[in-house]
Each structure stands twice: as C-alpha cells, then as structure tokens.
Image (cartoon, rainbow, N blue to C red):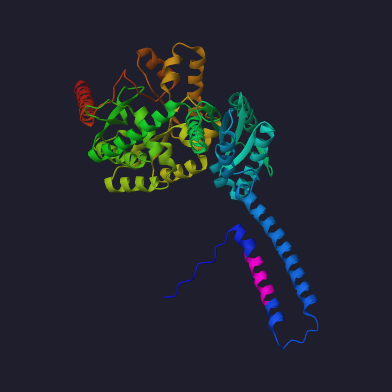
Amino acid sequence: MITAKPPLALSAWGLMFLPMAGASLLTGLFVLGVSFSNHLAILSPAPLLIAALLTYAALLFLLGRSGLANIRALEVRAVTDPLTLMPNRHALHAQIAQLSRGDAEVALAVIDLDSFKQVNDHYGHAVGDVLIARCAEVIREVCGKEARCYRLGGDEFAALMSGKVAGTILEGLCRTLLDRLSSPIELDGRHIVVGASIGLARSTATARVPSSEMLRRADVAMTMSKRGGRMRCTWFNESFDRRRERMREIAEEIRAGIAAGEFRLAYQPLVSAESGRIVAVEALLRWDRGARAPLGPNIFIPVAEDSGLINPLGAWVLRQAVCDARRWEGITLAVNISAAQLRNAEFPIKLGEVLEETGFPPHRLELEVTETCLVLDPEVAERTLDVIRSFGVRIALDDFGTGYASIGFLRRFRFEKLKLDRSLVELAGVDEASRAMMLSSVALARALDMGVTAEGVETKDQAELARLAGCDQLQGWLYHRALSAAEIDRLIEAQENAATGSGEAGGTASA
C-alpha cells in the first residue's frame, strides 16, 4: 500500500528564509564556477563577480521585504475574524493579559445573538453571514471608542474595557446594544429580529483572574441571561458556579435514577365541566429519591433538558403512560413534552414505535406543549407537530395565559385544545381584567374550534366561573389530586359502576 507523504509545513519565517537560502546557494555556485573554471575565457572576472554580488544583494532585499510583508499579513490574519474584520478570540486573550498588567479594572462582556440558528435554518448560511456582519456593525457603533469589540466565533461577540469604572460603563453600553438589537434588521427586504443575551465579568487589581477564566465567567453569566428570558445583561456571580456544580450532580443522579428505576408516574384526572365524570388523565413525573432530599419536576426536568437526559427519560414516560392507560377505556391520556424533545428529530419516530408496539389508540393520546417549546424554534416545532398529527395524536397548548401567544400563533399551530393556566383561573375570581381575559380566551378557542380546559381549580366558585365561561374540562384539587395508576383504576371502576347502577335504576323505574 502506497501512502502519500504529508505536505511540507513551514512557518511564516520559514517561507521567507527558504527562498533567500536558495538564492544564496545559486549565487555561491555561480561565483565558485567563475572563480575555479579553467574552461571559461574571461578577461577580467572582477566585474562579473561584483555584478553577481549586487544582484544577490538586490534579490535578498526584495525577498526579505516581501517575506516580512507576508509575515505581517499572516500575523494579522491570525488575530482577525475574516467575516467581520474584528479581532478574534486570540486577540482578546492577548489584550486581556496586557490590560491586566496595570491597576485598572478590566471588564468583559460576552454577547450571544438569540435565535441566530433559526435564521440560518430558515434563510440559509449566506443570509446568516450577512446578518453577522450587520450585527458586528451595530456592536461597533454602540461601543465606539470606549470599548474594543471582538468576534469569538459563530454568533458570539465580545466587548472589552479597562478603567476605574469600566464595568459600569460597559454595562451601560450593553443595555444600549440590547435596545438596538430589539429592532428588526433589514436584509434584502426581510426584517429579522435576533436580540442578544449578554454576560459580564470583571477583573480588578485586588482580584486578578487569567483571561481564560474571565472569558469562562462571562460565558456562564451569558448562559444565565438566556435562562432568565434572554435580551438581558447578567453579571457573573460566584453562586453561578455552585449552581452549575449542583446541576451537574443532579444530572448524574438522574442518570443513575433512570437505571435504578427511581422514577414513577402519577395521574391527575380531568373531569367534564358538565357531568363531573373523569374524561382524561394527565401523566405527571415523580422521582422517589429515598433518603435523599426530595426534588420536584420544576427542578429536575430543566436539568434533564440541559443535559440531554430528557430524551431517554421522556421516552420512558411516554411508554409507561401508554401502557398504564391502555386499560382505561374511553379516557384520554395527556403527556407533557419538552422543547428538547420537540427539537429531537428522533422523537416522532419513537412515538410511532410506542403506538405501534403497544397498540394504544392514537386518538386517545394528547401531547401537551408550552409556548416556550414553540417559540425557540418554530419551524422545527411546526414540522414535528405535523408528523405527530399524522399519527392521529392530538396537540394541546399548556399554560395558556402566561405567555404572548397571538391569534396568528394559535392559527399557525392549530392546537386541538387550550389549557388555561392556574394563575388565570385563580385571578379571574377576584380581578375583572383577569376575568375578561379568561372569557376572551375561551371565546378565541371556540372560534378556532379548540377545546378548553381550566387548570388549578381549587374552589367551587372557580369551577362555576370556568363552567360559565365555557370550559369543557376542569382540572384541580377540588376534584382530584395526582394519583397512582392503581388508584385511577379504582376511580374509573367506581365511576363505571355508578353509571351502570344509575342506568339499571332508571330502567326499573320506567318499567
């Protein structure tokens, strides 16, 4: 087998000195040939030698000048982003190290564009590159001469300042940048809104940190800005590291818990607003942690989403819930799915496999999604939901009334059901504005041919208000708490026996 030889790798200085060495060798050979050859008839070799040496000197000068120019160009390219012509990550590290030698405060902001991936997916990378260049211009304009700007790669930028109040000034610049990026950017007739999440970190004379650590801190703070709702600035806090370490520990415990079978399902019934009969159950995930401190789904599910464990955990939930609900004839099963599951191209495939292997009727399955799941990547979410609907599975929008869903949003995703958030149900009983919002939400759902469920019903007054507003189903502690599958078995059996008994009594009376 013949293997190709690797190409010769030369440094910038090697590229300059190699031609000079070649020229020197050729000139030396020529001089030696003239000096020692007995076959050349030269009347006076001195002028020829002088001409050769002058030519050699001129050649060395030209090669050296060209080589130095190439070295400078390569050095500039090594620290410059080719798309935006901003300094890059290497330049940032060097600049932080240089500024840290003084006594002034050094402040760093890491700027990450929100929703940039969606722009690339929807319009293509060419439009994405143009958008990056435009955003770089905006960042330059905002920073002006007060801060140095850098592109770290992808959709991530940085701004650096030093001085007595560098952190305060840089935070003000970042807030101005957020205001600028909240407005649409026009690209070839398209109006694109990207926004940004910003993390800030500082290094002072009494607490210097290396450039890599400073960049890490700013990046952690930026991640906290994204988790906090995006379009905001967040300063690094030592508690962030403790929180990250705790999240890592919880992720490891989740992984072990899945293998050990520590997770279980509870089911909260939904009743008909008219008859009070159980018509559906919602699967709720619980974690039996033994002697360890309990953790609620509001804590461990976000960790599972961030760590990627939501995919195996969600697959287990779906399969277990379907297996339990097969024996509850005529009862709809509602299962929550996360944004990470919607973004996973394998999820519809796994769903189809579960339905086929268990024989569960697709029309009895209802998947609940939140508005957040959809706005993070609406194109991908829409495609995924279309595939899920093709199986015959219904889609419900959970926690309606807490976000900013518009009529266009509801029409685009064509939900079969809206679930009014418990906060809206609770406030509707004491606040006129909330009551009006509840009534308008139900009317909107009716106009779009959607069913309506009221969540968090805890009092008879709330139940009556939801019923009069036009809700189809009611869910809350007034009727049932979350119960085990065995307890649901007994509830449904009692409900069926009551219905059979009333039917027989009616038949006897008519006879």
Left or right of residue 82, residue 251 in this image: left
| Left or right of 187 in this view: 289 | left
- The correct choice, above or below, for 309 with respect to 6 in the image is above
The answer to whether one can see residue 333 in this image is no
Percent across and percent down for residue 289 are 25, 30
Closer to the camera, 352 or 42? Answer: 42
- Identify which residue, 112 or 402, lies in the foreground: 112
Residue 412: image x %, image y %?
52, 37
The reply to whether residue 275 is in sight is: yes
Q: In this view, does 164 lie to the left or right of 364?
A: right
- Image quarter where the N terminus lies is bottom left
The overriding secondary structure of the stretch rendered in magenta is helix
Q: Residue at x 23, y 31 (%)?
A: 485
Picture layout, residue 163 above or below residue 96: above
Q: Give the range drawn in magenta.
A: 18-29
Q: What residue is at 59 percent from the left and 37 percent from the top? A: 98
